[in-house]
Image (cartoon, rainbow, N blue to C red):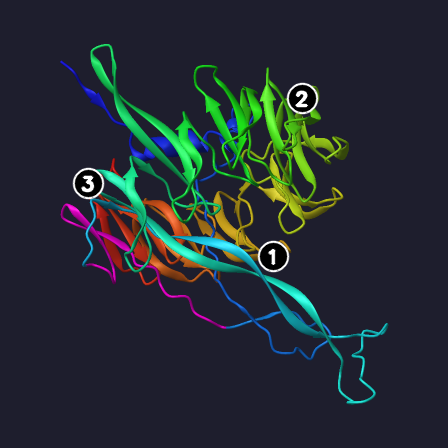
Amino acid sequence: MKTVKKITQGCVLCLCLGFGYQEVGAQTKPNDNTQKPTTTPTTKPTTTNKPNTTNPTTKDAVAKKEDVKPLPDPIPTRKGDIWVYSGIDKLTFEEAKPFRPILRPKTVKISVPELDNNKKPIIDPKTKKPKFKQKDSTYIEEVKILAAVSQGGKWGYIDRSGKNIVPFKYYIANDFSNNYAIVGTGEEVKVGDEIDFETRYGIIDENGREVVPTKYDALGDPSEGMVAVIDQEKGRTGFIDMTGKLIVDFKYTSVQPFHEGLAAVELDGKWGFINKQGIEIIPRQFEGAHDFSDGLARVYKSQNQKWGFIDKAGKEVIQFRYQDPGDNSGVFQNGMAKVRINNLDGWIDRGGVIRIQSKYQASRAFSEKLAAVQSGGKWGFIDLTGKLVIPHKYSAVEDFHDGMAAFKETGTFWGFVDTNGRVVIPAKYSSIETGFVRGIALVAKGDKTFYIDKTGKEYIATDKPDNK
């Protein structure tokens, strides 16, 4: 009897995530006592505010931002066997995903006062008024908001008015991330007595143009104009640019995305760093490596079984004296990086000076200037100075996103608190599928999943737990 095997949306996500930190996790030695990191949304919510271009009058003049409240995104809701969006519920789809933004930097001219050596405004002798000069100011502009939807068994993308922007022609359609989306086409092929579904992946921009053709076995998310690709026959990974041109040949066992112009690569158990021409700038000599951030990268040496930090010349900047923190938060954020000493977590600055004492049983990376820390078996949150701002009272937490963090106080149910520790949504959900992104989160209650907004209003997603 012939059977048909079809690749679901979830499978391609697993393939894509494999190019990221997960690959390093297999090469390092995480501490068993450290809480494993929770997957969060890859697209960070960004509020688009255009600067006010009127003349500033203070010596520290910068582009001011208009207090514009963004329109709420339509929320996907399942009604029986069809999907609709709030506000555009006349349109129906077989499946539907949340809206995601396309962001672009935009530069405008603003007027700022001319200052003298004492930082005081220079007065025009004729007009008796402060002199002004033109200056560039860059802000992030929201170009489009798109959502992946399916009709007739194929996927495309719509905007917030419901207009079809990308035709329904793909079998796989991921959310937009870094202003691009991974898509897949496929066909049924006979493998012995079975019919397999062979998928090929590519990348589209916000206009639906295939910037990378759909011909690859698997793709990583675009990062700094480069994309990790895998050749399944060779079992090796390389990099292409955003035109699909092969830049780095298929020769590495594992890779990480490009950050600050360099990418960590691994072959024969040794990690090093390459530039965008594929040249190994830092030779493969480490047994573990993480991305560059703030000019430094955390790497692992097996001879002393410790982690340290190197600069872009491969020079040791912060000595190899730290344990593995057990997750991927050992990158520099806000001038600090998480480290682990004597099985306790703390934070250091770029000079290796301790800024937050190593005293926590476990911790998570800073998100929205707050970090979850565990003490006495309970979780709370500290700020960038190390001050405890939300008490240790939770049995489990997740990072802050969109001003909200999931918590589990006692028992098995999850809710959400704001940055002041105030319970906004009571603990009543069995699991959190995604935290808040652009005002909505995906949660589960028993055999049903819901999209919820920040008031706790529920929009049913599915009653099939294996099809989230």
* Structural crowding at the residue carrying mark 2, measured as other residues with C-alpha within 10 Å and reported as few (<14), some (14–19) or many (≥20): some
Residue 443 in the image: x percent, y percent? 31, 48
Residue 152's label in the rendered image is 3
Residue 380 in the image: x percent, y percent? 50, 51
Q: Which residue is mark 1?
A: 387
Q: Point out the tag, 3 or 2, that comes first from the N-terminus.
A: 3
Return the residue nearer the eye: 201 or 346: 201
Residue at x-position 51% and y-position 36%: 243
Is residue 68 covered in magenta? yes
In this rendering, position of residue 51 left or right of residue 314:
left
Q: Point out the tag, 1 or 2, that comes first from the N-terminus.
A: 2
Q: Identity of the amino acid at label 3? A: Gly
Q: Identity of the amino acid at label 1? A: Lys
Q: Identity of the amino acid at label 2? A: Arg
Q: Which residue is mark 2?
A: 284
In this rendering, position of residue 221 left or right of residue 269:
left
Q: Do we see residue 24 in this rendering?
A: no
The CA span between labels 1 and 2 is: 40 Å
Task: Residue at the far right: name it.
Answer: 117
